[in-house]
Amino acid sequence: MTEQSTAPGQLHGPQSMPSSGMDEKDRNLEKIAKELGKDGKSLGRQLGFSEGELQCFKNDNKDNLKEEIISMLTAYINTKAHGDPVMELLKALKEIERMDLYTKLQNAAEESGDHK
């Protein structure tokens, strides 16, 4: 039997799930990750992740940038968000000048009632 555990201080682990088992928030994270691409690291810095933490996300998701970003966003929501994670993510997207994703996330949040 294999055991999955998270080492002390580890913020992430396997995050991916089939689309059929995803809720609206997960689908939104996946859409952001898919479109964010190379700006993922800039967003991670803006969200308060250290270079070491960003490297861990990369190492845990070799050759899969989308999964790397999904892991980072999930870890952010679960461990680093201090208030409304949607608002904080919107602010960070604005800071890295990704207004295209800012608008998409804002619209999705308003439609789902996650953002006022």
Image: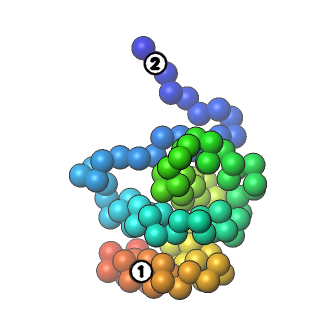
In the orientation shown, which residue stands out farthest toward the right? 51
Q: Quadrant of the N terminus?
A: top left
Between the residue at mark 1 and the residue at mark 2, the CA separation in whole angstroms equals: 40 Å
In the orientation shown, which residue stands out farthest toward the top? 1
Q: Amino acid at mark 2?
A: Thr
Mark 1 = which residue? 104
Residue 77's quadrant in the figure?
bottom right
Residue 101, image x and y in percent?
48, 78
- Can I make out residue 36 in this image? yes
Front-most of 102 and 114? Answer: 102
Residue 95, image x and y in percent?
66, 81
What residue appears at the point 69 percent right and 48 percent down from the top-left corner? 55
Front-most of 115 and 69? Answer: 69
What residue appears at the point 32 percent right and 80 percent down from the top-left corner? 111
- Can I make out residue 47 in this image? no
Q: Is residue 43 above or below residue 95?
A: above
Residue 109, image x and y in percent?
40, 77
Q: Is residue 9 above or below residue 110?
A: above
- SS at circle 2: loop
What residue appears at the point 37 percent right and 77 percent down from the top-left corner? 108
Q: Quadrant of the C terminus?
A: bottom left
Q: Is residue 1 above or below residue 43?
A: above
- SS at circle 1: helix
For label 2, count other residues whose C-alpha is less than 10 Å away and answer few (under 14), some (14-19) or many (20+): few
Mark 2 = which residue? 2
CB contact under 8 Å: marks 1 and 2:
no
What residue appears at the point 53 percent right and 65 percent down from the top-left corner? 37
Q: Amino acid at mark 1?
A: Lys
For label 1, count other residues whose C-alpha is less than 10 Å away and answer few (under 14), some (14-19) or many (20+): some
User: Quick check: 79 left or right of 33?
Assistant: right
Q: Is residue 79 above or below residue 31?
A: above
